[in-house]
Amino acid sequence: MQYNAPDRLQAAIHDWAGTVVDFGSFAPTQIFVEAFAEFGVELSLGEARGPMGMGKWDHIRALCDIPEIAERCAKVFGHAPTDADVTALYERFMPLQVEKIPEHSALIPGAIEVIAAMREQGMKIGSCSGYPAVVMERVVEMAAQHGYRADHVVASDEVPNGRPHPAQALASVIALGIEDVAACVKIDDTTPGILEGRHAGMWTVALTCSGNALGLTLEEFQALSPEALAEGRARVAREFEASRPHYLIDTIADLPGVIDDINARLARGESPQAC
């Protein structure tokens, strides 16, 4: 049997918070601040955003490994934060997260229209998130109320290894019946999410303005001066450099041109692994 490289995209696999819902990715980050505060540990929103994209237990572990935060925890706990402390924080984080999801469930402008256009081209829509299943269920429920459903959803605790490992993205490939990972594009607002797509052998699109890295509400983003917007884009682009996304765009609303360009590159015989 002969191998035939794909000449068009067959699937898009998107992240959720900061990508199709929750402009600025506030639902997860603000809750980290609140969960730590309930244990008497101060955490800034900027600090909470640092490891975004990882599974939430791993995210808390990564926060607790930051020397300054570990020192604050030690003053409260009487010792450096252990895995048991991380689990206690996670178990407090979870119900807070589920409770707050509806407050940050609005779809990002353009998401429904762009995804509908991809479906019209015959593409399937997979999705994954750093959220565990219990939170993801609520996110999916709220998105449906706003008129959107993905074809497949994978939560962080439904695979052996979360981001930056490729397991979640590849789970969608399997579930959607995609014949080649090179026919897939991963869209995400975090470095671990872009690395996930890279490790899975997919095209990758990093969102610079709607997600965690810029960290602004839709209203704050729309109010930026041209100079401030350019500065923000440049800063976020630098943060993404190590993960080597194939494309950088502001929000999912800018995706159609990228889809057209990837299709043209596939038709020329290019592959994401070689770029």
Image: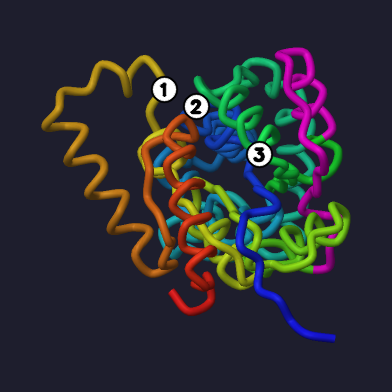
State the quadrant of the C terminus: bottom left
**Label 3 neighbourhood size at 10 Å, few (<14), some (14-19), many (20+)?**
few
Please tell me which residue is depicted at 79% across the width and 43% down the height of the picture.
91
72 vs 2, nearest the viewer: 2
Amino acid carrying label 1: it is Thr
Residue 38: give x, y in percent of width and height.
Answer: 64, 33
> Magenta segment range?
137-160
Q: Is residue 42 left or right of residue 180?
A: left
**Mark 1 and 3 residues: CB-CB less than 8 Å, in contact?**
no
Alpha carbon distance from label 2 to label 3: 26 Å
Q: Measured along the vertical axis of the image, is residue 145 above or below residue 121?
A: above
Q: Which mark is residue 217?
A: 1
**For numbered disc 2, what is the local secondary structure?**
loop
**Mark 2 and 1 residues: CB-CB less than 8 Å, in contact?**
yes
Q: Is residue 174 magenta?
A: no
**For numbered disc 1, what is the local secondary structure?**
loop
Q: Nearer the viewer, mark 1 or mark 3?
A: 3
189 vs 79, nearest the viewer: 189
Q: Measured along the vertical axis of the image, is residue 15 above or below residue 104?
A: below
**Label 1 neighbourhood size at 10 Å, few (<14), some (14-19), many (20+)?**
some
Q: Measured along the vertical axis of the image, is residue 149 above or below residue 186?
A: above
Residue wearing tag 2? 23
Alpha carbon distance from label 2 to label 1: 6 Å
**Residue occupying the far left of the picture:** 227
Q: Residue 89, can we see it?
A: no
Q: Is residue 32 left or right of residue 137?
A: left
Q: Measured along the vertical axis of the image, is residue 75 above or below residue 201?
A: above
Residue wearing tag 3? 121
Residue 223: give x, y in percent of width and height.
Answer: 25, 16
Q: Colour scheme in the image? A: rainbow
Of pointers 2 and 3, the one earlier in the residue sequence: 2
